[in-house]
Image (cartoon, coloured by chain):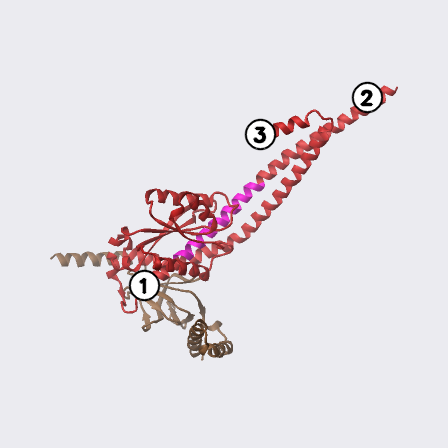
Amino acid sequence: MFRQAAIIAGRNTKPTQVRQYATLREIETRLKSIKNIEKITKTMMIVASTRLSKAERTKATTEQFAKQEKNFYANAEADKSPLAKEGKNLIIAITSDKGLCGSIHSSMAKKIRNVLKENANADVIAVGDKIKQQILRTHESNVKLAFNGVGKSDPNFLEASLISEEVLKFIEQSAETYNKISVYFNDPVTSISFEATNDPVYNEQTINEAPGLCKYEINEDLNVNRDLFEYALNSKILSAMGKGYAAEISARRNAMDNASKNAGDMINKYSILYNRTRQAVITNELVDIITGASSLD
Amino acid sequence: MFSLRTTALRSLRRTYATEGAAENVLKLQFAVPYNTFYKSSPVKQVNIPLESGRAGILANHVPVVEQLSSGVVEVFETDASQPGKKFFISSGFASVQPDSTLNITCAEAFELDSFDLSKVQSLKSEAEKNLNNADQTIATDAKIQFDILSKLEAELK
């Protein structure tokens, strides 16, 4: 369709005499707009690179923060609990509201869709507008809860606890029991690559049945397991947000770097084209002038 | 016979688990969301405030999971000449893993030296005003604030 329009536009402009001047003007405006795009992408890249070091630090500290649950789950062998395989699955997918960062959000959506292909009745909680839109398009009935306004800056404890509080409210009101909650996030494997992975959080019943729990002395009266589940959910969401944020920032930096490079290539091509056309116009005018002058002789 | 073998196996496994680290050393992992104070560093003893009272954790402590109340976490590093480092924490969780690692995570923690007593007192009196507020949430917030600040004040004095 676009091509056809271009052909028609081309046909209309072809026979007129002023064509060369018009293309020159056209090329000029095009060149200007590409230069502006390059400025924007370059600035976004610089902003992303300055944010990257802070994001990496947050990622490291939140990862350490979530280590307690990781160690506990590993030692208590929570994944071997008979309840872990039962019940409905709850998926918390963590992305952000902002785009312009390459394929990071769509790869997460692809991952979630693959999970939903195998496990069609799993419930999804979407954190961030990007994942919400993508999952709603294909699996509308699975999305139970969605958050937005996240991922604007480094995640903090308060942000994560506001989300986990709503999640807990949702779990309480729901008729289903979710023995295993999978928190999906983008893990920055290296500075240039990322991978959508997940970390589990088990509810207190599952932990109670875990085979390795007997290693621990736990005060049952204080309801430690329930509190631990709530705390674990919070710290998992926090560390997932930390990792996701770092992955997104580095992906944005790379995407914007590439975009600036492409814009630079286009600027080179267009400036050559512009100069050539300008030269052609000047030569044409000279020829006109010379022929005019020689006809007077 | 069988039980003897299993205990033998278990003790074997225990030695395996602690083999990587130096013998009889407590490893401390102390983290808040924005900072990591200790990252599996060897320490001598850690005193922690629990919901059920204060506790001192040494190496080879039995594995536990405990909820922390607000109070002071005191860390004695391996260098015996140094006095213990004190941190004031809001609340959180502590767990001792079978490999003699102590995990402490809490929402907020700062070194006790960084608090200003006069500021704590003024904040405390401010919280005291709201204790009997008609709004239940404000009153509860004030109660928590007041409790934590009184504990902090007692530690600073």
Task: Say what secondary structure mark 1 lies in.
Answer: helix
In the rendered structure, which disc, 2 or 3, sits on the residue that comes first in sequence?
3
Q: Are marks 2 and 1 on the same chain?
A: yes
- Name the residue tied to disc 3: A3
Subunit under mark 1: A
The Cα atoms of the two marked residues, 2 and 1, are separated by 95 Å
Task: Say what secondary structure mark 3 lies in.
Answer: helix
Give the brown chain's letter: B
Point out which mark residue A279 bears.
none
Give the red chain's letter: A
Query: What segment carries the magenta color?
Result: A236-260
Q: Position of residue B92 (x, y in %)?
A: 38, 66
Q: Are marks 3 and 1 on the same chain?
A: yes
In the rendered structure, which disc, 3 or 1, sits on the residue that comes first in sequence?
3
Subunit under mark 3: A
- Residue sitting nearer the eye, B48 or A153: A153
The Cα atoms of the two marked residues, 2 and 3, are separated by 39 Å
Point out which mark residue A226 bears.
1
Task: Say what secondary structure mark 2 lies in.
Answer: helix
Q: Is residue A38 above or below residue B133?
A: above
In the rendered structure, which disc, 2 or 1, sits on the residue that comes first in sequence?
1
Whether residue B116 is visible, yes or no, is yes
- Residue sitting nearer the eye, A264 or A152: A152
- Name the residue tied to disc 2: A291
- Residue sitting nearer the eye, B76 or A8: A8
Q: Tell me the amino acid under the disc marked 1.
A: Arg
Q: Position of residue A277 (x, y in %)?
A: 70, 30
Q: Tell me the amino acid under the disc marked 2.
A: Thr
